[in-house]
Amino acid sequence: MNNEPRVNIIGAGLAGLSAAYALAREGVKSRLISLQASERAQSNLAEGGINAVLNVMDENDTIDEHFADTIAGGCNLANPDMVWALVKNAPDIIDLLIRLGVPFNKTDGRIIQRNFGGQKKKRTAFVKSSTGKMVTTALINAVRKYECNDLVERLCHHEFLNLLLSEGDNRCVGVSIRDIYSERDISLPGPVIICCGGLNGFFHEMTTGTTANTGNAAARLFLQGVEFSNLEFIQYHPTTVGIPQKRLLISEAARGEGARLFHEREKSRVYFMEDKYGPEGNLMPRDVVSREMALLPDNTRVYLDMTMLSKDIWENRLSDLRDELIKHLHKDPSLKPIPVRYGIHYFMGGIMVDESHRTNIEGLYAAGECTCAYHGANRLGGNSLLGAIHGGISSANSIIKAEQLSTYNVENFIDKKISGMSDYEVFLNRSLSEILLSGLSILRDENKLSESLKKIEELFQSNHSEEFEGRLLLGKAMLESASKRHESRGAHTRTDYPKSDDKYLCNTISVYKDDSVSVSFRHI
Amino acid sequence: MKKNISILRRKKNEASGYIEEFEYNMKSDEDTVASALFDIAARIAVEGKRPLVWEHSCLQIKCGACAMVICGKPQLACSAKLKDLPDKVTIEPLRKFPVIEDLLVDRSVMRERLKNMQVYHEKDAADSGDESTYQSMKCLQCGICLEICPNYYGEGNYAGMSGMSAMAQILSKAPDKTGTRTKQLKKNYYKNVYEGCGKSLACRDVCPAGIPMDDLLSRMNAAAVWGRSKSLL
């Protein structure tokens, strides 16, 4: 390994790969640092597609409408300038992906786009229901080209330990990582891009994500003073199924292709979404659908009926989804409705970044699901792959513009180590998870939130590592953010404050400073 | 139902391992080997013993992290249902890769081989071959096909079927069907895949991603070795 200054990218999923690719094509050297290979990243699990205005479906779609749908889906909480940059870049991203070899579904040589939740036009390009896997594989191949000429150095089986901070902790000069095979710690100079994914590990076994997304990197960053934003906005996806140790996603693409949600009342089917919202009800944004499901009487069983989908759809557009459900549930979705329940799927909040993907610490950037960037109070399906790629490229471009790698130096640098979690803390972590799940369920109120905050204070009294302290602090920040937002907006539903209040058209900002968590509001 | 889980464990930097046995009470018929390993790892943690080390990520047969040898057969721990296995379930690390600790193996040789084979598009991919690209891009790079292959020893040039799938991703979309770059990739394919493959087809039934291995291999050989078919390219 070379200790020269390079851009240090933490996480080798889609955001990290995109950043490495964008840097390398401009001749800028990076290190792609991850615990596992890119094939293990959560990006591979994304199913339904990626949004962009391509105007191939004869619907006169416009970038303005992609912008408007994204802003409305996010309940006006997303930064409009950032969303505009995202949707404007989307067609170029699809063009790039085609050039990198993504085999998008086509008809007569022309890309097909499907309907997706919260969007009025067919705007979601896809590869059956394996879009994330295909896009990630194409990016892995693209980055390999630059691994061969050393513009990208891959450090798999390396764990993020901490940032190397100088100038009163306001400037990041590098990163400290550990080789988990040799257990050797290494300090590396250069700006850092965090692409560590969402906070799945805070919600043990209750998300559609991967176990690799522990949230430990986020906890360590929070301890080091990195600002997080909008942590109260957690996306519950309406159609998931429990399988051992996790929730299995049934892609929104199923409803995009025509599947319907219903429950049974006195032996007849109630299409509750269509009854309330009209024929397009099944494709309302995820926050709306999940909330409607949560509001049904206890023990109401909701089903997803996919039996009406045509042979062509099953064979050419959703074949992999059907295979997956047969494999895991032993049920053929083309024959019988599948019982579904909402499950945690995405974190709209995360590391606060500006339009250039800079954080509050100089030299530190972030991209992908770990950031609070494009999705406001609720993310639209098909915007996550887009956000990860656009974020990775944007952070790379900002670094190319603003940073001089040769000025980075970590020699003689005193590294403030953060002690790691030991194995027994896994149980403390499960307690934390239960506390968070109870406070941050779909329907929230002050009683539940303050009860959870009280319980988290008890956990602070336990004997634990600094890393777990970081987890507790970040967990507390999530609860406090939810507690302070006295309104309902997007994925944040307060039964005691059921209406949106424009007074709260602000981001919550969480930061650990002077030994305590502070949560405040800041204008978008 | 109770299962006896027998794990071949190994400490870091030690040449040989030891077998440790655990009881696992199944919670449901859907429990997998991964369910048992999580449970065992947690119990070991409470007892303060050396943690059980294994790689896991998606738990839904989409990432290839948890490949290991279960009852003699290489497979993903998240796909191996306990109810389909005998009362005594033996678990070992993949044998064709260096063991780091317990069930964790170092599969970086797979990535290095793909670099040597230049598995990437030099220029823009062609707008063709979508179905072959899709089938080959399903590859998880998990190493299960290499584990079962009688011709793969972990050394030398042979990249096995994971190398074949990766090369198919590129050749199926090669923009210059007869150009120098394509010729070089075909040469690399010949040297790193075709020459090493003994056609045992042991890999056919083990791929967790369900890649149609026979079909893809035949197409690759026809196009890249025999120059018989233009369908893949």
Image: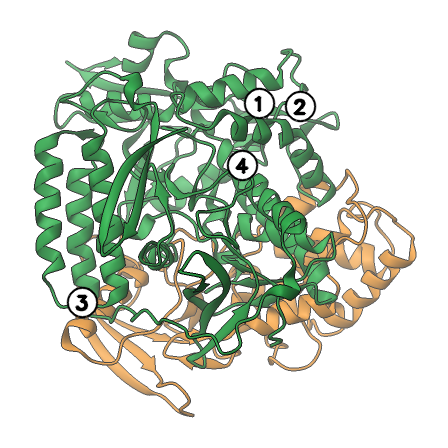
Of pointers 2 and 1, the one earlier in the residue sequence: 2
Residue B41, position as x, y percentages in the image: 24, 69
Q: Is residue A401 left or right of residue A72?
A: right
- Dot 2 crowding, Cα within 10 Å, few <14, some 14–19, many 20+: many
- The circle drawn on residue A237 is none
Q: What distance separates the C-alpha of mark 4 from that of mark 1?
A: 24 Å
* Image x and y of residue A314, in percent: 51, 30
Q: Which residue is mark 2?
A: A54
| Residue holding disc 3 | A464
In the displayed structure, would residue A252 be above or below residue A402? above
Task: Specify whether residue A246 is in view.
Answer: no
Q: Which mark, by number, is residue A355?
A: 4
Tell me the CA gap for discs 1 and 3: 48 Å
At label 2, the amino acid type is: Leu
Residue placed at 29% from the left, 23% from the top?
Answer: A504
Q: Are marks 4 and 2 in contact (CB under 8 Å)?
A: no
Q: Secondary structure at mark 2?
A: loop
Question: To which chain does the residue with label 1 belong?
Answer: A
**For the residue carrying disc 3, how many other residues have a C-alpha within 10 Å: few (<14), some (14-19), or many (20+)?**
some
Separation of marks 4 and 2 at Cα, in angstroms: 24 Å
> Which of the chains is green?
A
The chain identifier of the residue carrying mark 4 reads A
